[in-house]
Image (spheres, rainbow, N blue to C red):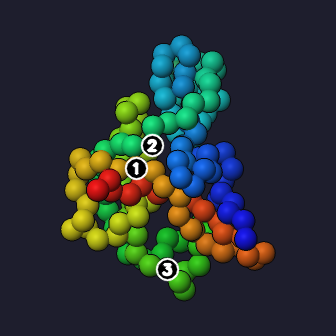
């Protein structure tokens, strides 16, 4: 069984130390995720790929208690379990929308330290494990 990323351009797939793939503008320094070919801040096109910090702080969050609409949701609605969703502010200053590994709101707090992990999203038809990224509280 292989692990395959849900999108090959979103993150590096080292299960011990995954990193999100973003881009930095060489003109104004704006960092974006996912990576972009042109800068949303100054519209320049001199962007380069950068690997983002693995840790950040929880900026805000909510708990997704029902399946998102199918499409675009790619999961299986019948096996849906609630999960946390939040924005994590990275050292680079950008806020990344992400799944959270924790779905109990009592165990989440705005401002807490979070780190990037990969988790199983679904099983592909060939048995491969499709991963997605998520942030988990640093304990
Ligand atoms: Zn720029």
Residue 86 position in % (x across, y down): 36, 55
Query: CA separation, marks 3 and 1?
Result: 24 Å
Between discs 1 and 2, the one toward the N terminus = 2
Q: Please tell me whether mark 3 sits on a helix, a strand or a loop.
A: loop
Query: CA separation, marks 1 and 2?
Result: 6 Å
Q: Find disc 3 in the rendering and name its residue.
A: 80
Label drawn at residue 115:
1
Q: Is residue 104 visible?
A: yes
Q: Residue at x 34, y 70 (%)?
A: 103
Q: Residue at x 55, y 21 (%)?
A: 25
Q: Are marks 1 and 2 in contact (CB under 8 Å)?
A: yes
Q: Please tell me whether mark 1 sits on a helix, a strand or a loop.
A: strand
103, 32: nearer the viewer: 103
Query: CA separation, marks 3 and 2?
Result: 27 Å
Residue 1 horizontal side relative to residue 102, left or right: right
Q: Find disc 2 in the rendering and name its residue.
A: 54
Mark 1: give few (<14), some (14-19) or many (20+) Cα within 10 Å: many
Q: Residue at x 54, y 43 (%)?
A: 20
Work out which residue is located at the far top of the displayed protein and give it. Answer: 27
């Amino acid at each position: 069984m292989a692990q395959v990323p849900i999108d090959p351009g979103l993150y590096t797939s080292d299960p011990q130390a995954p990193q999100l793939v973003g881009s930095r503008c060489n003109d104004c320094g704006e960092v974006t995720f996912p990576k972009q070919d042109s800068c949303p801040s100054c519209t320049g096109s001199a962007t380069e790929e950068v690997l983002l910090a693995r840790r950040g702080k929880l900026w805000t969050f909510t708990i997704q208690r029902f399946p998102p609409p199918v499409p675009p949701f790619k999961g299986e609605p019948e096996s849906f379990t609630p999960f946390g969703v939040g924005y994590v502010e990275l050292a680079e200053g950008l806020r990344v929308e992400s799944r959270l590994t924790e779905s109990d709101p009592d165990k989440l707090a705005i401002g807490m330290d979070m780190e990037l992990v990969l988790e199983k999203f679904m099983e592909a038809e060939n048995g491969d494990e499709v991963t997605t990224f998520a942030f988990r509280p640093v304990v």
